[in-house]
Amino acid sequence: METDFAEGTVNAFLAIGDDLTLIDTGNPGKESFQQLKTKLHKHGVTFNDLDKIVLTHIHIDHAGGIPYIQAETDIPIFVHEQANGLINSSIARFEKDQQFFGDFLQSCGADPTKHIVQRQFKEENWRNVTYINDGDTVFIGGKPFEVIHVPGHSQSDILMWNHETGDTFAGDHLIKAFSVNAFIEPPLLDGEGRPKPLLQYRQSLEKVSRLPLNTIYPGHGEPFTEHKELIQTRLQEQEKRCEQILAILANNRKSIFEICKVMYPRLKGKTIFLGLSQIQGHLDLLETRQKVSFEQNGLLVEYFAI
């Protein structure tokens, strides 16, 4: 289905077998919902025919269709437990998260009024939600798939693979056409520090590299195989970005926004957040390696090479 994001399209999959399972639902909005409905109809399927919906994660281009689908019928939804607390969240939680993102941009030296999408709170009421965990089994098209929790791109990311065939629904964990951004997110619980998503993502890649996967059905782009080679490519890309950042910091301390302007000069406006998130993740990695450190002045954080 079409999406306004840079990827151009987003995938939803219909698994037809002893039951009918929909994996992901596309963007929010009536237009995307109608696209999904039309594509299901081409297979002679309506929403009432579905036995369940499994979400690979709850980013809006993958879970945005849920309120529209549930306005028509009450289908069970399966999603990782990290989504609990974010689904059907209160306006207080929404405002706290928005404050986190505003503070993060200021810590980077960026302007929250220019460089982040200002979202409006929209109350939702998802029903019939089952929260699943790492190692659980979910039946997709009547076949058993093991749930693998792969946080990094988001905290609720899961990959699901069938032991017999190696078929895998990977969401946005692994995409062949482009590298995945490990997005900065607020802590799930009050008092916790923010997650360090690139560190999580690398651990998830390591875990997935040990699995005997076959055909991978991603959240964007065409299905592919040879996941171990792709994982090595992605890890090498991360090393190259770390080298770029160290070169930028070689002579002067800089804010994340200043690093972003050098590394990603084409990013403008609301897309700046993508670069800031990417760079913060790599700085987290470099900090664990004792290659960089930082000083904080008010909200502004400046990094320097050690």
Image: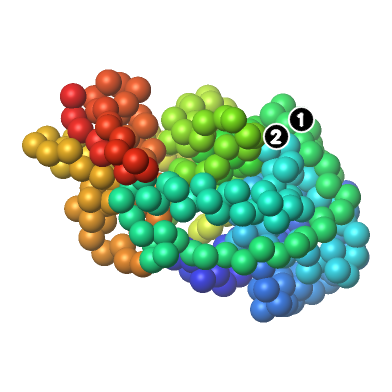
**Depth order, front residue of 46/213:** 46
Mark 2 lies on residue:
147
Q: Is residue 260 left or right of residue 171?
A: left
Between disc 2 and disc 1, whose residue precedes?
1
Tell me the kind of residue under disc 1: Asp
Query: Which residue corresponds to the image point at 53% horizontal and 26% vertical from the top-left?
Result: 207
Quadrant in which the N terminus appears: bottom right
Quarter of the image where one finds residue 273 = bottom left
The residue lying toward the viewer, choosing from 142 and 94, is 94
Lateral position of residue 96 relative to residue 235, left or right: right
- Which label belongs to residue 8? none
Q: Residue at x 79, y 39 (%)?
A: 131
Residue drawn 58% across the image and 49% down it: 97
Does dot 1 land on a helix, a strand or a loop?
A: loop
Percent coordinates x, y for residue 120 in the rendering: 62, 66
Q: Is residue 130 left or right of residue 82?
A: right
Q: Is residue 8 left or right of residue 143?
A: left
Cα–Cα span, label 2 and label 1: 5 Å
- Count neighbours of disc 1 (C-alpha within 10 A) and say few if under 14, some if 14 to 19, many if 20 or more: few
Q: Residue at x 29, y 38 (%)?
A: 297
Q: Position of residue 162 (x, y in %)?
A: 70, 36
Say few, some or many: other residues with alpha carbon within 10 Å of mark 2 (under 14 / 14 to 19 / 20 or more).
many
Residue type (three-letter) at the residue carrying disc 2: Val
Question: Which residue bears the numbered disc 1?
Answer: 136
Dot 2 and dot 1 residues touching (CB under 8 Å): yes
Residue 235 at x, y = what percent?
36, 34
